[in-house]
Amino acid sequence: MLGLQAGVALGGLVLGGLMGGAATAWAAATGGIISLIATAWFALRVFSGQRRGRPAKAMMRGFYVGEVQKILLTVALFVIAIAWLRLEFLPMFLTYMAGLMAFWLALLPVMAGANE
């Protein structure tokens, strides 16, 4: 999953460079990196080895807390990228969305097998 999102960030870097130059490439890569960092945080928070063998209620609470933390981290990273780094919003947001879509599209084969 993280490798796929890293590929999206790299693809955004290349595509941004071809379409709009260095500033667009940097913004697009940053959007992909924000997606990658948020997903990695969620994975570490929710799927760490400490969580095994815990009751289902505690595990679900961990998922909810991890998702809220992921959203807050994403917002904070966007604020930093826009306010501090002054990156172009559109290429950054589009690559972030592509990274998010890659996450969900990668889950489709898993979800399709769950109904069998």
Image (cartoon, rainbow, N blue to C red):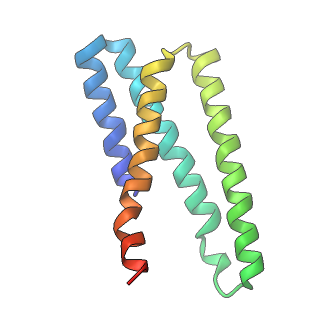
The x and y percentages for residue 17 are 27, 18
Q: Quadrant of residue 110?
A: bottom left
Residue drawn at (71%, 50%) of the image:
69
Q: Position of residue 111 (x, y in %)?
A: 42, 70
Q: Is residue 52 above or below residue 20?
A: below
Quadrant of the snapshot with the N terminus: bottom left
Q: Is residue 37 above or below residue 66?
A: above
Number of marks drawn: 0
Q: Residue 38's x, y, as percent?
A: 56, 46
Residue situated furthest left in the rendering: 18
Residue 64: quarter of image: bottom right
- Judged left or right of residue 11, residue 26 is right
The residue at 64%/62% (across/down) is 45
| In this picture, residue 22 sits left or right of residue 100 | left
Residue at image coords 72%, 82%: 56
Q: Describe residue 99's horizontal placement relative to residue 74 as left or right.
A: left
Residue 106 in percent (x, y) is at 37, 59
Nearest to the observer: residue 92 or residue 33:
92
Residue 68 in the image: above or below residue 26: below
39 vs 106, nearest the viewer: 106
Q: Quick check: 67 above or below 101?
A: below
Q: Is residue 40 left or right of residue 11?
A: right
Quarter of the picture containing the C terminus is: bottom left
Please name the residue shown 53% across and 54% down the image. 40
Residue closest to the far front: 115
Quadrant of the image occupied by residue 65? bottom right
